[in-house]
Image (cartoon, rainbow, N blue to C red):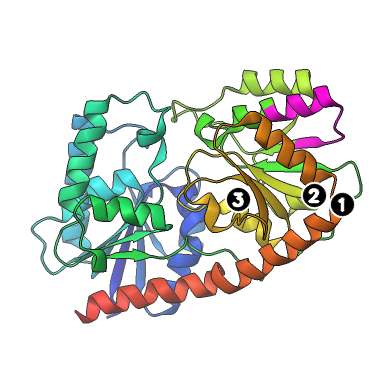
Amino acid sequence: MAPRILYVVTEDWYFLSHRLPMARAAKEAGYEVHVATRLKDDSAAIEREGFVPHALSWSRGSLSPAGSLSAIIALRRLLRALRPAILHNIALKPVLLGTVASLGLPALAVVNSVTGLGSLFIGEAGVSESARKMVRLALSRLVRRKRSRTIVQNPDDRAFVIGLGAAPETVVLIPGSGVDTKHLTPLPEPPPPVTAAYVGRMLADKGVLTLIEAFALLEKRGTALQLLLAGDCDRENPGSLAPEQLREFASLYGVQWVGHVTDIREVWARAHFAVLASRREGLPKSLLEAAACGRAMVATDAPGCREIAIEGETALTVPVDNTEALADAMAKLAGDPGLRRRFAANARRLADNKFSAEAIGRQTVALYDELIAR
């Protein structure tokens, strides 16, 4: 029988959007892939990939005691029924609950992907400091589980996990889940006016308000630049902007908010460069896709962002929450097509060499194989 791997993810759309290359690589390497998640509209899409979906009843935005206990019991039952060789928990909630559910199953190898510290630690979640301390304490115990590895996406998160007490040799840096550089290819710049684009959820921690403020400042200066926002609001995230806010910004400042875009190439065909004002990332998929499509970047010098937005090579970088610096960088890149071309070529080269789905898939499968061999 092929060894089974069970991915535990909060949402079906997130699995397909962010983790599909990793799961495809596992399937191509001979693993039988199962996915436990909250199933909404994408169960059939998961099945079409040759994976087996399993429904979990939980809320991504909640870590209530009753809901957490129910999820742990459901995961425990699933683990006993499937008897996978590897359990791969992705993001904070699955890491916490999935690892607890795996306790007492010594034959099971556990991989925990820390995909960024998220709003729980960086401000907009409305979570008390005592709750943060409890999560840190729980993580510090769980990352020490025998036959486990923790995957992080940037050096800052690696230092954080080791600081929790994980042995350094058990913390593996694999930068993301991979970007499809065969599907996403360099695009020619569109005609003027110059357009900057942000792709992602409309969250305060993603710097959306700072970005809009910077754009409003450029409007006052008379800078010829358009701003395109692509992505949905997130009702389960307390840091999400409301649709009414975005419609008001669009009316006041001429911001183009297009909501969810199925084919991301449509965004980069319209935009001259990417912008991300995030406070912290694991590894921003939006910038990886922009790089694959041959786009220069303006981004914050924040954990995760700086792995792909490299000052003077692929991007102009600015301090977090600095509206004026962000406006200045956007104006500079908008007015210098030669700089955009140089950054774009470097960004595409970096995406090919370091972040392609094939490269990341090889690294991830090698980790699975190592754990099974042990």
Residue 254 placed where, x, y %?
Answer: 80, 26
Residue 294 placed where, x, y %?
Answer: 73, 61
**Residue count near mark 1 (Cα–Cα under 10 Å), binned few <14, some 14–19, many ≥20:** few
Amino acid identity at mark 2: His
Residue corresponding to mark 3: 286
Residue placed at 63% from the left, 18% from the top?
A: 244
* Image: magenta residue range: 214-227
Residue corresponding to mark 2: 272
- 4 vs 77, left or right, is right
Task: Please state which of residues 9 and 167 is positioned toward the viewer in this rendering.
Answer: 167
**Which tag, 3 or 2, sits closer to the chain's start?**
2
Amino acid identity at mark 1: Pro
Say which element carries label 3: helix
Residue placed at 65% from the left, 32% from the top?
A: 211
Residue corresponding to mark 1: 190
Is 219 included in the stretch rendered in magenta? yes
- Does the residue at mark 1 contact the one at mark 2 (Cβ under 8 Å)? yes
Is 153 included in the stretch rendered in magenta? no
- Does the residue at mark 3 contact the one at mark 2 (Cβ under 8 Å)? no
Residue 189 appears in the rendering? no
**Residue count near mark 3 (Cα–Cα under 10 Å), binned few <14, some 14–19, many ≥20:** some
- 44 vs 185, left or right, is left
Amino acid identity at mark 3: Ser
Q: Which quadrant would residue 57 be assigned to in this image?
A: top left
Quadrant where the C terminus sits is: bottom left
**Which tag, 1 or 3, sits closer to the chain's start?**
1
Residue 29 appears in the rendering? yes
**Which tag, 1 or 2, sits closer to the chain's start?**
1
- 47 vs 252, left or right, is left
